[in-house]
Amino acid sequence: MKDTIKYVIQRVLLIFLTAFIILSITYILLQVLPLDVIGSKREELAMFWNKQVELGYFYMMRSSDPRLTEEMMAAAKAKIVFGSETYYYFPYPVMHRYFTWLGNIVTKWDWGVSANLYPNTPAINIMAKALPYSMRLNIIAMIISVPLGIALGVLAALKKNTWVDNTISTVVMIFISVPSFVIISFMLIWFAYSNKWLPNRWPSDANAAADPILAIKAYVIPVAALCFGSIAGFARYTRAELTEVMSSEFLLLARTKGLTKGQSVVRHALRNSMVPIVPMIIGEFIGVLSGSMVLEQIYGIPGIGHIFVDALTAKDYAIVMVDMAVYTTIGLFATLLVDLSYGIVDPRIRMGARK
């Protein structure tokens, strides 16, 4: 037990170190890129640039400042005119902004504000609002796909080399080969546009609250698109693992001791075949979460995947950094959960043990 606790602590510390390195490199690279702030209102632009000054990323000089030269005015990142006064904004060096950014996060948990997508809205608030959409979508997909995929894999293994096995294997290979965005596009054309059984776009919060049936229907297409590939993957791996275990010597020994085929499968074969499958479930959740970027973009779901793509397109770097932090943290902790799950499924495996 002590070895396991020590192992977990070491891994958690390594996760934070890895996340720190990844996010630091990402932030520095993003700061090298040009920052284009597109605003239709002068007040919004002034609020954004003054916020950058307040956070310590930029400094501001007035046109009346005698230190301001023509070269400096030409090199200013932004300028805003209020009456007879013009305000010029200049960035601090990249590394100065980097350490200021770290300090703002550690001391104030301030990740900056949106420049273009949601002007002057804190990036952390935008992500907090978007995350539940992606989490609900992917959790529902996993709740459906895990039991169905494992059940189909078990059925195929028990009916090996029969028409049932051949049918399941053929369907599995088809859905593994077809990308999820192709499936969602086909479903949109067939179920939404041609027959109008389902909505062709994710409803707004107001419309979903006014029509609960519409809100439920909106989950059908994206959840199905996520489920098909996951079900196929679980079915294939379960069939492969269970088939291999069922042909092992210890299972034949269990049969010779009087256990029926069903008893030997449930008590011994399934447990041993689950050793590589349970970690796959955790890894699949992360894969589905990442893969939902395209689905959210196509179906208009306001989740973190959709916002991430929009933020990259709009060069909204504050949102990009928060989104990267979410994906990086979830992905790194998922690797820890995958490792720990081996010991849960198979007690013979001890995490952190020297022998």
Image: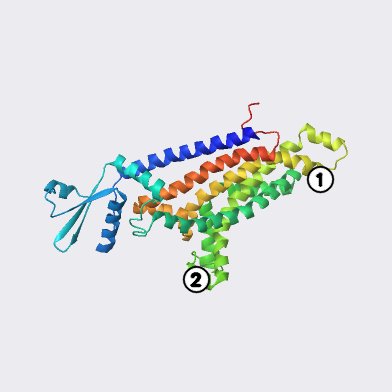
Q: Earlier in the sequence, mark 2 or mark 1?
A: 2
Where does residue 9 sit, x and y in percent of width and height? 56, 37
Q: Which mark is residue 207?
A: 2
Q: Which mark is residue 262?
A: 1
> Given the image, on which type of amino acid does mark 1 rest?
Gly
Which residue is pictured at 53% across the width and 66% down the height?
192
Q: From the viewer's perspective, is residue 13 above or below residue 182?
A: above
Q: From the viewer's perspective, is residue 287 above or below residue 1?
A: below
Between marks 2 and 1 in the image, the one whose residue lies nearer the viewer:
2
Q: Quadrant of residue 197?
A: bottom right
> Given the image, on which type of amino acid does mark 2 rest?
Asn
Where does residue 117 sit, x and y in percent of width and height? 36, 58
Q: Quadrant of residue 80?
A: bottom left
Residue sitting at the far bottom: 210
Where does residue 30 sit, x and y in percent of width and height? 34, 44
Is 206 on the left or on the right of 142, as rendered?
Answer: left
Which residue is pictured at 75% across the width and 40% down the height?
269
Residue sitting at the far top: 355
Where does residue 322 sit, x and y in percent of width and height? 42, 50
Which residue is pictured at 16% across the width and 47% down the height?
72
Is 100 on the left or on the right of 2, as rendered?
Answer: left
Instruction: Look at the numbered disc 1 and give the secondary structure of its residue.
Output: helix
Instruction: Look at the numbered disc 2 and give the secondary structure of its residue.
Output: helix
Residue in the foreground of this view, choosing between 70 and 186 = 70
Q: From the viewer's perspective, is residue 198 above or below residue 321?
A: below
